[in-house]
Structures are given as C-alpha cells and as structure tokens.
Image (cartoon, rainbow, N blue to C red):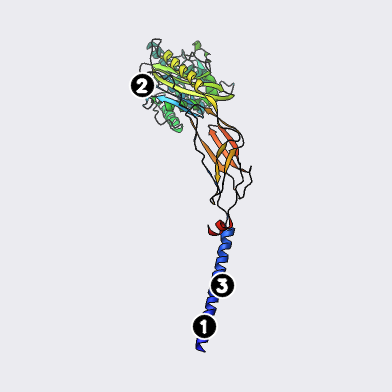
Amino acid sequence: MAADRSARIKRRLVAVTVTVLVVALAAGAGIQWFRPLPQPSIEGLTTPIRLVGNAPVLPWPSSGEAAVTVEGVGGLGQVRASRPVPVAGLASVLTAYVVLRDHPLASGAVGPSIPVPPATVAAYQAGRALGESEVAVVAGESLTELQALEGLLVDSGNDIATLLADWDAGSIGAFVAKMNLAASDLRLGSTHITDPSGLDAATTSTPADLIRLGEAAMSVPALRQIVEMGQATLPQAGLVYNLDFDLGLDGIVGIETGSDAAASGCYLFAAQRSIGGTDATVIGVVLGQTGPSGPNNAAVDAGDALVRASGSALGVHTVIPAGGVVGRLAAPWGASTPVTASAEVTVLGWPGLSVPASVHLDALAAPLPAGTAVGVLRVRQGRRVTHVVLRTSNPLSGPSAWWRLTR
C-alpha cells in the first residue's frame, strides 16, 4: 500500500511539473511572439557625403595670411592662418557691429545725432599730422549715427571710431571691453581688441575669426548696406571714396580694408555668386599684404583673385540621382532591401567637399511592400536643408515564426 501511495505521489508531481513547464513554455512563447519587433536600420550609407574629385587649388598670396569660406557650405582653405596678427582697420567692423547691436538702425533711418566733442577733433588733427586715415570734423558739429558709421566703414576714419566708442559706452576703455565681450559671444577665440580702430598693433585676430566676424556683420542689414557703398558724403569731409576699389566687381559686396605699418594691407571681403540658380556668399580675408602699388591695393588684388577662383571652383553637384540607391534597409532577422531616394539630391560645393547627411527612419512594422516610404534623408548646408523621402525598392519580409519564438 505504501509503495502504491508513493508511486501515485510521484506521478502527480511529474504531471504537475510537466503542466508547469508547458504553461511556462506557452507563456514564454506568447511573450516572444507578441514582443515588439526590433526596428530595421539603414546600412551602407556613407556620411558625410564626399564630392568626388580633388579639392581646388586657389591662388593664395605668397606672404601673409589668408582664408576663404563659402557661407553655410564650408572652408575652401587657408594659408599661414593660425597665428593672431595685427588687423588695422578691420577692427572697425567689430566696432560697427557693437554700435549697431546697441543702437539698431532701421532701413532708411539715420539714427540719433552724435555731437563731436573736442577730443574727437584733437584725434582728427593728431592723426592727420601723422598721415593716418581720419575723417574731417570740426568742434560743435554733429553727425547722425548713419553718417558716423559711413565715416568709419567707407572712409576708414580712426577718429570716428573713437567718437562712436565714446558715444556708445562713455569711454574708450568701456567700449573696448564691450568689443572683447562681443568677440567672445561670436566665438572669436583668437581675437584680442585694445582699441576701436585697429590702429594699435596689439589689436590682433586670425583669418578664421575675421571670417566669422564678416558673417555676423553681413547678417546686420544696416551694416551690410554701409559696407556696400562705394562712396559717401559727409558734412565736413564732403565726398569720400571707399578704398575697396573692387566693390561691385566679381560680385564683391564689401566688407572692409585696412592698412598700417604693423599690419600691412588687410582685406575682409564678401562676394555674392549665383551658381546654377543657387545663391552663394563667399567670405574671406587676406592679411599682411605688401606690393609696389601699396599695401591696400595689394590686399584688394589678392582678395579679388581668391573671389574669382572660388567662384570658378563652386558648382551644383548631384550626389544622389532620383531613384538612386542610398543604402539597404536591414532587419535583425536577416531580411533586407535596397532603399532609394524619391528625388534628386544636389548640393553646392566643390570636389573633395564633405557634406553632412543623416537618415531619420519612421517607425516600421514588417513586412513592408516595395515602394514603402521608410524615412527621410536630410542633407544640410547652412540654412539650406534638403529633405528626400526614402522608399524600399523591394519588399521587406517579416520574421519567421521560429525567429520570433527563439530570438
């Protein structure tokens, strides 16, 4: 009897154990089956996208520093451009930027009246005696903000730089502090300002910083309007001419020239080009230029040569044709299908340029038929962003029952 009872207990235990195992396996299988499937991913897309060919060779000046960039696209190159050097009158661009940040000018406005104090008259007389670039002023007169900025940027007046600094901040020292703070805000990490005109050789910068400054300056409509002026009429000086004699040529729209014994010839330039129906802004700088025609002319000539060569190097490139394969949509269970672009992808650039690109996939539930929109390819160049829908070129099968249960 005891043996029979023990056998019955063992049989019951085995039955319970088998039942528990069957229930557990069924529950596990159910969990596995109904677990969300992992998302497919894009494979084979190389980012950034590199334009085929060798980078262009630009006519860099044989001495001094230089750099060129295409706004929103990238840098075309630089030479001897890592060490901060004196920048002469290019500092006045930052002066104007700070003044217009503190005292914005609407389109067509002339701004408030600025009295000319005796200190500015004295600065004009002293600078003129030394042969420096000054704008004629007399005691008791007033200039509008617009006239003062024209005297600063068109006629490169050192005395006008001090006038604007005193008017804006109450003293030269306080304004210089503002300039250095603005330089920090603009990420001009290699720029050091000691005076508002750049006459002090301790006011230094690098081509990379000056290009960033040029981009910021050209984003201010009033500042851009002034640097595009070939001439201006001022109360005492009369008609004055911009020393950027290439304004209006080769698409050049500014920005500023400067020269002195410490800096030699300097030129921060911007040029507008239309490339295949796409607008491009070339911004560059040359520093430390000398030549038989004088430092200012040497700097402008060197800058213009870079503008022309940059325009020739630029083109609109098709990086992905409509229907072109971008990569493969690959699922963890081994299924895959080519993914194609629904439209042509073009970029502005030059051979050798790397263009940022990224893919944003939708939430996908396999299986997927051919032609399914699975996400978007985004190609970014500054403010220009191209969005192209990606589609499967073949069906993407779902996972097998065995894969779902054993994953």
Q: Which residue is mark 3?
A: 19
Spatial separation of the CA atoms under disc 1 and disc 2: 105 Å
**Type of amino acid under label 1:** Ala
Q: Say whether marks 2 and 3 touch (CB < 8 Å).
A: no
Spatial separation of the CA atoms under disc 2 and disc 3: 91 Å
Observer-nearest of 19 and 306: 19
Residue 7 numbered mark, or none: 1
Residue farthest toward the bottom in the current orientation of the protein: 1
Q: Position of residue 94 (x, y in %)?
A: 46, 25
Q: Is residue 192 above or below residue 130?
A: below
Left or right placement of residue 290 versus residue 343 in this view: left
**Type of amino acid under label 2:** Ala
Nearer to us of marks 3 and 1 is 1
Q: Position of residue 113 (x, y in %)?
A: 53, 20
Determine if residue 118 is in view.
Answer: no
Q: Position of residue 1 (x, y in %)?
A: 52, 89
Q: Answer with mark 2 or mark 3, whichever residue precedes in sequence.
A: 3
Q: Is residue 338 above or below residue 206?
A: below
Residue 178 numbered mark, or none: none
Spatial separation of the CA atoms under disc 3 and disc 1: 18 Å
Q: Which residue is mark 2?
A: 201
Q: Answer with mark 1 or mark 2, whichever residue precedes in sequence.
A: 1
